[in-house]
């Protein structure tokens, strides 16, 4: 990431790109059904979500340095983090059920 994704660009395969393209219609259907809160590109939203937990793991040493008094790495802490990220994604990404139902009925 710090190098502008140069290493990733050298190792990414056409299959990786094809996998994203294969799921694109599904993501768009989810968005068209009104299940996503934002009209931001649906595929980009799911790619962003896919990077949340690995991002937390990569930042863990910094969190530990900035907040040494907080347990950030025990199995219990990791479970709490996973639950937080799931709640964060659901609350931020997915539309409220009544809202989605109204859009689907239109």
Image (cartoon, rainbow, N blue to C red):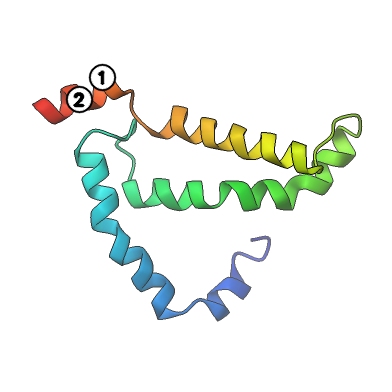
| Residue 101: image tag | 2
| Left/right of residue 22 with respect to residue 60 in the rendered view | left
* Position in image of residue 44 (x %, y %): 39, 50
Residue ranking furthest to the front: 76
Report crowding for label 2: few under 14, some 14 to 19, many 20 or more residues within 10 A (C-alpha). Answer: some
Residue ranking furthest to the left: 106
* Position in image of residue 74 (x %, y %): 81, 42
Q: Check contact, mark 2 vs mark 1: CB within 8 A.
A: yes
Quadrant location, the N terminus: bottom right
Task: Give SS at disc 2.
Answer: helix
Task: Find disc 1 in the rendering and name its residue.
Answer: 98
| Residue 16: image tag | none
| Left/right of residue 43 with respect to residue 62 in the rendered view | left
* Position in image of residue 68 (x %, y %): 91, 34
Report crowding for label 1: few under 14, some 14 to 19, many 20 or more residues within 10 A (C-alpha). Answer: few
Quadrant location, the C terminus: top left
Eyeballing the image, is 71 above or below 12?
A: above
Real-space Cα separation, disc 2 to disc 1, in angstroms: 5 Å
Eyeballing the image, is 40 above or below 99?
A: below
- The quadrant in which residue 16 appears is bottom left
Task: Give SS at disc 1.
Answer: helix
- Residue shown at the point (71%, 50%) measured from the top left: 57
- Residue shown at the point (33%, 23%) measured from the top left: 96
| Left/right of residue 13 with respect to residue 8 in the rendered view | left
* Position in image of residue 105 (x %, y %): 10, 26
- The quadrant in which residue 102 appears is top left
Instruction: Give the number of marks.
Output: 2
- Residue shown at the point (19%, 40%) measured from the top left: 32
């Amino acid at each position: 990431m710090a190098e502008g994704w140069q290493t990733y660009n050298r190792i990414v395969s056409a299959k990786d790109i094809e996998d994203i393209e294969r799921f694109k219609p599904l993501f768009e259907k989810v968005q068209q059904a009104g299940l996503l809160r934002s009209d931001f590109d649906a595929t980009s939203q799911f790619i962003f979500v896919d990077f949340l937990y690995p991002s937390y793991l990569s930042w863990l040493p910094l969190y530990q340095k900035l907040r040494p008094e907080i347990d950030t790495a025990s199995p219990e802490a990791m479970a709490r983090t996973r639950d937080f990220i799931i709640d964060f994604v659901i609350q931020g990404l997915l539309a409220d059920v009544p809202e989605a139902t109204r859009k689907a009925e239109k």
